Amino acid sequence: MNGRSPIGQTILITGANTGIGRATSEELGRRGARLYLACRSEAKTQPVIDAIRRENEGAHVVFLPLDLGDLDSVRRCAEQFLASGEPLHVLVNNAGLAGQRGATKQGFELAFGTNYLGHFLLTQLLLPRLRASAPARVVHVASDSHYECKNLDWESLARPTRTFMATKEYEISKLCNVLFGAECARRWKGHGVRSYSVDPGTVASDIWRKIPWPIRTVMKRKMISTQEGAHSSLHCATSADVADHDGRYYALSGHDRAPSELAQDPTLARLLWEKSEEWVRAWCDGQPGE
Ligand SMILES: NC(=O)c1ccc[n+]([C@@H]2O[C@H](COP(=O)([O-])OP(=O)(O)OC[C@H]3O[C@@H](n4cnc5c(N)ncnc54)[C@H](OP(=O)(O)O)[C@@H]3O)[C@@H](O)[C@H]2O)c1
């Protein structure tokens, strides 16, 4: 895409049935992109598909089943997309959860497994198609909460959530998004696939669903809208301004900013990549490409 209009470009976005993902998809639909919405529930995604088709005659919008908390589902989602034969110009790794405790199907901490590891596998499986469709981009939706994470305890990633509010676990998952974004850029240099991580801002989306009403309602009044929250993803997915800034972290303002010191550590990013490869290999047949 390389900063051109997304007209006719194929874009796959995870977690598109609500929140920032829905706003991002609707705007990309307006700009003429061919969309693949990878979500857990077809029933919850259909209203988004209907809205995009209503607003944009002849829009190409397809539902893909994806549960990021199950690596088998991630693999099936990638296979289904690859079987379509479509090129892939932009992958937006948007889906995420917060404030929820537990473990993924394969036993990883819930936020880490869903927000990061599922996207790690999805990206690896789709990479050959991204490369074949170059110039292409991957946008990793991270968060400024990654600044709060001061160290990565590897053991905590492969067991259920320990903290009561799952805040620390969420921060870790978002640090991993930023580390992954930077490491993708280092590894893919020269292959025509660029990588960006973004902070959408503090957005009045469904991510706050576990916060009790009426506190949630009061909190959300001070937040930006999901349309505003989609701005940084859209910017990195489509703008010519970022084309030469592979691997950077973008804030809501549309400007890049330095991520945390830990997020800039290339040794940590390489280690996370290698461990992630080991983890996903243990559960999936075949070997993810680099
Ligand atoms: N809102 C904020 O203030 C804020 C700030 C910084 C970063 N972010 C990031 O922005 C991204 C989008 O969040 P949002 O605020 O738009 O939240 P949201 O309204 O809760 O939307 C999250 C999306 O992720 C999907 N999702 C959750 N678990 C999934 C799974 N196991 N498999 C597939 N999809 C799954 C949800 O699907 P279901 O509807 O099926 O649950 C939903 O579509 C997240 O990565 C979040 O960390 C948000």
Image (cartoon, rainbow, N blue to C red):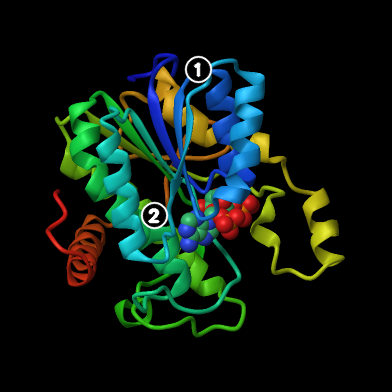
What amino acid does circle 2 point to?
Answer: Asn
Name the element at disc 2.
helix
> Are dots 1 and 2 in contact, CB under 8 Å?
no
Which corner quadrant of the image does residue 81 belong to? top left
Q: At 30% from the left edge and 77% from the top edge, which residue is drawn? A: 154
- Dot 1 crowding, Cα within 10 Å, few <14, some 14–19, many 20+: many
Circle nearer the viewer, 1 or 2 = 1
Instruction: Give the CA distance from mark 1 to mark 2.
Output: 28 Å
Image quarter for ligand 1: bottom right
- Marker count (numbered): 2
Q: At 48% from the left edge and 72% from the top edge, which residue is drawn? A: 169
Q: Is mark 2 within 8 Å of ligand 1?
A: yes
Residue that carries the numbered disc 2 in the rendered image: 177
What amino acid does circle 1 point to?
Answer: Gly
Residue 182 percent across, percent down from the top left: 30, 46
Q: At 63% from the left edge and 32% from the top edge, which residue is drawn? A: 50
Name the element at disc 1.
loop
Residue that carries the numbered disc 1 in the rendered image: 32
Residue 163 percent across, percent down from the top left: 54, 83
Q: At 36% from the left edge and 54% from the top edge, which residue is drawn? A: 119
Residue 208 percent across, percent down from the top left: 69, 61
